[in-house]
Image (spheres, rainbow, N blue to C red):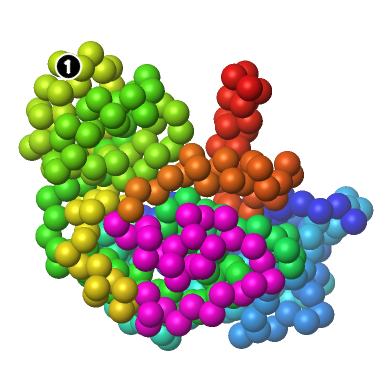
Amino acid sequence: MVQSNILCKNEKLSDEQYGLYDTRIKNRNLLSTYLVGRIEYSDELVEGGVYHKGDILLKVLFLGISYEYSCFGDVRVVKTYCKNGSIVDYNKPILLMERMEILSLKKNDEDSYMLMQGILSKTVELNDVHASMLANFLYNEWSTNYEELVPGTIFSAHSAGIFNVLLASGSASFPDIVYFIKKRAQLIKDLQCKEELWLLMTENLDDFYQKVLDQCYKKVKLAIMTDENSGVIAMNEEDSDLLESIATSEKQFYKLRKLGVKAPYHTEFLNPFLDQYAKLVEELNIVQNDSYEYIFHCENLNEELLYQWNNTFNWKGIMEKISRKSKEIKDVSPNKFITKQMQKLRKREKEFG
């Protein structure tokens, strides 16, 4: 048996698409084939049936080779287009599916469902606080390989990735997390902060913090410490001249890039709504699954969510904890973000001791 996705072609039917995944019909995947061959649906496959990641949905026989199509995630089969055992022609539809996460979203939170429709149809921009957080959460959920999770797995994540840790570890439910993301975004909007996030590149972040950021602490705050040379700051664009003036006088070279995130996450700019945020965290109903381990600033996930609200996210420190904890990292993030960061960290450790 040859494992292949050669027959999988997710074609666009209209412009109402979004880059989370290529679809032909909004919220759905239409499977067609590049091959001419005999199609055999799985014996268990029926219209309306729900199937999970790794389940074999069908295979196409071509020149004596069997090409399987395995399920990419939790889906519901909407329609089968071919008679079992028939010959399927090039580029013809064979199966229509829809993701269960979208259906769950519609069932549990109509507001979030409608927002996701706007994202998918490109009528909602991802610089919207709620849209960006919801899209990030769902993208990570769709892309995570849950098959690799076993008791004793060590979880960690960068910033808002903690929402996916809560779900993957079974410490919080999908509906509760979706609701929490919505209410959290509303808090940010109600605060009406003028500060936003900027990528900061320096020759040495510690030096820059002590010589520059300390002098403009009320206006510019460090949100994320990424590594020795870079991080993320929160500030109002109007205060960029102040930052430039101090950096120039201290002979500190730096570069800035606006990230398009209209919220001062991980800073004291969010202090006024800390009590309201704490109530939201309580409503998230976290029951920490201690079958796994967690590496963040705090061992307790409730406490970690509270900490991240108005404290600098020390990603550099978390990565160092991960490095000390384990030499082998099983990274289930969709873009292998932690693996890439760990490679950089260990390269620096090897170079500088």
Rendered-image quadrant of the N terminus: bottom right
**Residue 174 appears left or right of 334:** left
How far across and down, in percent of the image, does residue 38 sit? 81, 63
Up/down of 61 relative to 280, above or below: above
Nearer to the camera, 95 or 1: 1
User: Could you tell me which residue is drawn at 18 percent across and 40 percent down?
Assistant: 217
Residue 285 position, x and y percent, is 45, 82
Where residue 257 appears, x then y in whole percent? 27, 32
Q: In terms of secondary structure, where does tag 1 sit?
A: helix
Residue 165: percent from left, percent from top: 54, 64
Query: Quadrant of the rendered structure where residue 251 is?
Result: top left
Q: Is residue 224 magenta?
A: no
Q: Image point 24% across, 42% down: which residue?
A: 221
Regarding residue 14, the answer to whether it shows in the image is: no
- Closer-to-camera residue (217/238): 217
Residue 165 seen from this side: yes
Bounds of the magenta segment: 281-310
Does residue 180 appear left or right of residue 244 in this picture?
A: right
- Residue 285 located within the stretch drawn in magenta: yes
The residue that disc 1 covers is 248
Res 150 quadrant in image: bottom right
**Callout 1 crowding tier (Cα within 10 Å): few <14, some 14–19, many ≥20:** few
Where the C terminus falls, by quadrant? top right
